[in-house]
Amino acid sequence: MVAKTPVEMLAAVDLFTVLTKKEVKKIHDAGKDVQFRAGRTIVSEGETGVGFHLIMQGKAKVTVNGRLRATLGPGDYFGEMAIIDRGPRSATVTAETDVQTLGIASWDFMPVLSQNFEMCRKIMVELSRRLRGAEKSLTH
């Protein structure tokens, strides 16, 4: 299996699948390589979310109210809503091993959107689609 590039991994994020390669590259370029040592808390439940993380290497655990909900590895991500609304984190994510992420802060992401109307429109349409899907699953 051929290893995916960071841009290819980012293009697989649900929110960004509607974008062109060039648009995904612009988002990638707004990010930074972030390292976390094993055992370190990456984000804490309830804190204000300020960014998105795409795991490039390593494993992290997701807990809600102290209960394990998931284990994340390369290609997994969290905080995609935080780069848009800076709302509170719904879970704690802790590095199980040394973890490398592509981190994108809200204040770096928003200028990319503000300079690219079509990209912004595509993301808004995708968010609306996801919200409709969530509402539909709650009513059925």
Image (cartoon, helix red, strand yellow):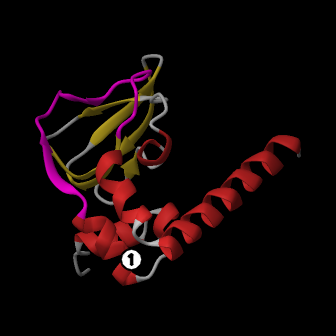
Quarter assignment of residue 109? bottom left
Region in magenta: 30-50
Q: Residue at the spot x=32%, y=47% of the render? A: 107
The residue labelled by disc 1 is: 23
66 on left or right of 41: right
- Where residue 87 appears, as percent x and y from the top left, is 49, 32
Residue 73 in view here: no
Q: Is residue 90 something that shows in the picture?
A: yes
> Where is residue 13, by image quadrant?
bottom left
Q: Is most of the magenta stretch helix, strand or loop?
A: loop
What kind of residue is marked 1? Glu
Residue at position x 44%, y 37% in the image = 86
Where residue 69 appears, as percent x and y from the top left, is: 47, 32
Q: Is residue 131 left or right of residue 36?
A: right
**How dense is the environment of label 1, judged by Cα within 10 Å: few (below 14), some, or many (20 and up)?**
some
- Please report the residue visible at 44 percent of the width from the left and 82 percent of the height from the top: 20
Q: Residue at x 43, y 72 (%)?
A: 116
| Residue 102: x %, y % from top left | 23, 55
* Residue found at the far right of this picture: 140
24 over 32 or under it: above or below = below
Task: Give the total number of marks visible in the rendering.
Answer: 1
Task: Assign the N terminus to one quadrant of the image.
Answer: bottom left
